[in-house]
Image: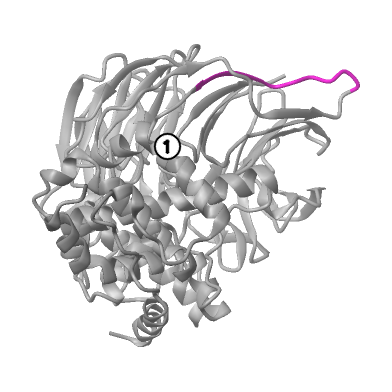
Amino acid sequence: MIDDQTVNVYQKHSSELTRFATGLVGPSDAQDVVADAVTRLITAPVWKEAQNPRVLLYRAVLYEARMFHRARRRRMTREARAATQEAYVMSDIAPEVAMAVSNLSPQQRAVVFLTYWNDLDNRTVAQLLGVSEGTVRKQLGRARERLRRVLE
Amino acid sequence: MNDLDDRIRGLIRTIGEAAPAPPTIDPRSPSQTRRPRTNGPLVAIAAFFIVVAGFVGLGWLFGESEQATPSSATTGSTSSTSDSPREAVLSWKTTGLDISDSFRSSSGRLLLSDDQRLYAASGHGGFGNFHAVTALDKRSGEIIWQREDLVEGPVQSVFLQTLASGDLIVNGQYDTLTAAESATGDIRWSFQLPDGYGAVASLFVESDGSTVVDPMLIVAAESAGEGETPPPLVYAFEQGALQWKASLKAGTALQWSSPVAAAGVLIVSTTPSYPSSAPGNIIQGLDITDGEILWSANLGGEQGFHFYPLIASGDKLFTRGGNGVVALTLQTGEEAWSYESLDAFPLAMRPDGDLYVVDAGRIVVLDQATGQETVLIDGIRSDDSPVGAIVTSSGDLLTVSPIGIRSYSADGEENWSWSADDAIVDWELDSSTAVIATADREVSRVDFP
């Protein structure tokens, strides 16, 4: 049974979480990733003691996205042994956009999305994702360089 | 704000605006969370992972300790071109180690080993228990010790190194570097960077074979700030004591390639300070006895970050630069020759001093003196393209790709190959064994034929 507070917290953040997931795995799988992340998180003991549930929700979505990519990579490795880069399912998005983002790791996608969509500074992104500012800066630099190669 | 930022913002806006409606959660039961749209096969995968994650996932996410279970199960497969088939044997597999799933760059290690132990570091600062360094018995895969307090914050891990004294050097994401006793994990000394410097970005252990105490530990630190930043610092330690400190050229920042030293010259790969300038490849040579900058070479050509190995041999440095592979004279930094190919990067040195290079589905040998090319192996699939290699004492070339390991004789004939069951994310090779970490958070030891 889900308590009302959990429902309210989720409803408050559900749209931004789904956009965030879209940035990580694409629109086709964003809902599944969010649903699985939330399902897992709200049944964990840590949820009841959460001081900042929004942070946990973001980390849960990112974790689920990474699991999603691992599952895909595992499947592709075993079945085809033909892919080292996870595909970015972007059936609803232009191919050139999908290609640009497909070169980024999940963490780089997260940093880029939070920086350019949510307009968050490095400190806030670091706090949200549970990493250092140095990591955010480094991942953002790498992501910008990879995107530059595709976009320019 | 610049044009690139505008383009990225536009791209992200395209993606963000394509977001579907959020899934709804059912107040009656979390297991009945509704998903307005589902993808059949992915539901099965997600269901599988929910089951698996019930055992390991939440611990990974929220920092609970992991279960590591040595196994004698045999996985992977071997093929051989020999008349008498020889097979690589999976000696053990230990699961549940939080190895990062990002493929390693040339700048550091997630795995390394000495005669007795294997050391596995968690990763690059991900989301969960990324604080751990684990020592395993190299013969059995059993965990000997595991520490989560060697550095403040997550273990950056890619600069895990060992010294002759048995110290294990562990680098964190913040400004602390720690040396731990490799047998026990006990902390022996720590070093903290000065204000204004964020983290150790590059590390190298100088070992020339003649040193009887600890070889020199070279630490290059990146600035913590944005925009106009102080130049990178390079420290040299011996037995934990600072020998010298040097600043690299102003207006440069460290790349991710590990430094290398030969003939008394320490080589560090840098870029014009980024993001205030476009990234590029500037190689700097320092006197290894006092840190004085001897020369600086801007390799020009294709702009980009430098993840590729710096290989020093004889009187030359080989690396990726310009529009291909370049050879620089170690003492002056002057270009000796270049091999132009946008896909090429150096792989390993042959015993005769020539260079193995990966180049667009081929492994070629470049003459050390002239750069003249000889094609050794052709037709390598892109997913099986080598990303690392060693040359064994018998002269064979052992390569590792994301999907397996191959052995070639010096004339390019394939001896045998071994295919991993999962994507390889890091490895440790010697002449007779490989230890590999896979995307499935497993570490395995494979004994070669």
Answer with the quarter of the image where residue B226 lies: bottom left
A7 inside magenta stretch? no
Q: Position of residue A109 (x, y in %)?
A: 38, 64
Say which quadrant the C terminus of chain B sits in. top right
Q: Which residue is mark 1?
A: B51
Residue B330 shows in the view = no
Judge by depth and name the residue closer to the eye, B348 or A105: A105
Say which quadrant the N terminus of chain B sits in. bottom left
Q: Position of residue B315 (x, y in %)?
A: 56, 45
Q: Is residue B377 above or below residue A24?
A: above
Answer with the quarter of the image where residue B182 lies: top left
Judge by depth and name the residue closer to the eye, B377 or B145: B145
Which residue type carries mark 1? Val
Q: Identify the residue at image location x=39%, y=85%.
A: B10
**Which range of residues does the magenta coloring cover?**
B83-93
Residue A144 shows in the view = yes
- Quick one: which residue is furthest to the front in this view? B28
* Circle 1 SS class: helix
Q: Identify the residue at image location x=13%, y=44%.
A: A48
Q: Identify the residue at image location x=63%, y=53%.
A: A83
